[in-house]
Image (spheres, rainbow, N blue to C red):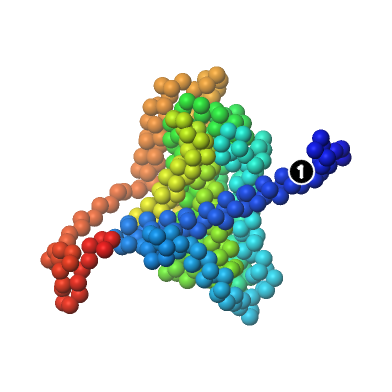
Amino acid sequence: MGGASPGGFPDWAIFLILGIAGALIVVNIAALGVPYVVLLERKLLGRFHNRIGPNRVGIFGLAQPLADALKLMTKEDVTPSAADKLMHALAPLVFAIPVVLMFAPIPWADHAVMADLDIGILYIVAVTTAAEVGVFMAGWASNNKYSLFGAMRAVGMLVTYEVPLVLSIGAVALLAGTLNLSDIVRNQEYVPNLLFQPLGFLIFMIAVSAELNRAPFDLLEADSELVSGFHTEYSGMKWALIQLGEYAAIIGFSAIISTLFLSGWKGPVFLPGYIWIFLKMGFIISGFIWIRATLPRMRVDQIMAFGWKFLLPLAFINLFVTAAEVIAFPDGLPEWLIPVNIGVAFAAVIGFAKLMGFKAQTRKLTFSGDYVPPGEAVNGVRTVARGG
């Protein structure tokens, strides 16, 4: 560390420059990706709701994120007079910084990783959990009962869904024999973990949806009950920083899901690894948006019961089955176990659903009224075709 490199720079200066460059890359992945994930969500939600979505700023609305950013930077920053000023100001930073840190050990291609940690997935669990401290600080410091209720719900959901999430990660770590994310990707050379871990994938997706505050687990910001939940009293750039953290977490967890279950940057044809992982992330993010547009919000008691009585037992079953298979086949799982594990996943989900009394409910939708073709006027109002 104290010597000089052949180029004349001391070792500490090279480490410092590389560290600053790496930090800038990590921050920019999150900062530049978030506005367009927001735009993708608004566009897809518009289509799901049979409307157009943002399309006025730039070509196809592509400049809408820039307009939103300018609006947020020029909005007034209001702090309630009864709030704890210091905690109120620090909470968005405490929430957003751990989310940005989670990008460091994610492998984007072969040997393209910022920090190739031996305990990479454990590090991600630790830093993403720390973000909830910022949520509780925001709720408590606002001196608003709705904000505090939202923050308390965040802590309750974290405790409930963190255990199944960690257990599903444990099953993947058992298969790979490591906590290093690059090694987990290399272990999926021919078969992605999704096929050997269908139940683990389902558990991880549900637990991540809850931790990301995505529908149907979006109780933290339930507008019909809590206005905007823990960030009700935030505006301007503080509110923008909270939104940055929320959507950066979606990007980060999409990368982690791709890494753990979908072979990460590996793909079936010759394309750069980062293209493959971005495609998989886009598919997963679109899935989160689709679920938001489809499922209604669950009640608090339903979410807690679902986590403790349904998801946690399934996570234990998945871990025990995986451990037994790894012990039985120490040189690698045979491919004939894929249909067996899929069958186990179906049997476990259906069995526990019946045990808990879950029943599928169907609704018959009927159309009432006369159909009006696009372009015809009804009571002075002219209908338009979708996209028109």
- Residue 387 figure quarter: bottom left
Which element carries disc 1, helix, strand or loop? helix
- Relative to residue 259, is residue 47 drawn left or right? left
- Relative to residue 130, is residue 257 drawn left or right? left
Q: State whether residue 285 is above or below residue 376.
A: above
Farthest-out residue, left: 370
Farthest-out residue, bottom: 81
- Quarter of the figure with the N terminus: top right
Badge count: 1
x and y percent of residue 323 in the render?
54, 28
Residue name at image x 57 percent, y 53 percent: 30
Comparing 302 with 123, the one in front is 123
Comparing 154 with 233, the one in front is 233
Residue name at image x 19 percent, y 72 percent: 382
Residue name at image x 59 percent, y 41 percent: 106
Residue picked out by circle 1: 15
Q: State whether residue 302 is above or below residue 176.
A: below
Comparing 17 with 316, the one in front is 17
x and y percent of residue 234 in the render?
57, 71
Farthest-out residue, front: 7
- Residue 49 figure quarter: bottom left
x and y percent of residue 64 in the render?
45, 63
x and y percent of residue 39 in the render?
44, 58
- Quarter of the figure with the C terminus: bottom left
Residue name at image x 49 percent, y 30 percent: 321
Q: Amino acid at mark 1?
A: Phe
Report if residue 313 is visible in the image. Answer: no
Instruction: Estimate how packed mark 1 is, as few (under 14), some (14 to 19) or many (20 or more) residues with alpha carbons within 10 Å.
Output: few
- Residue 11 figure quarter: top right
Report if residue 346 is visible in the image. Answer: yes
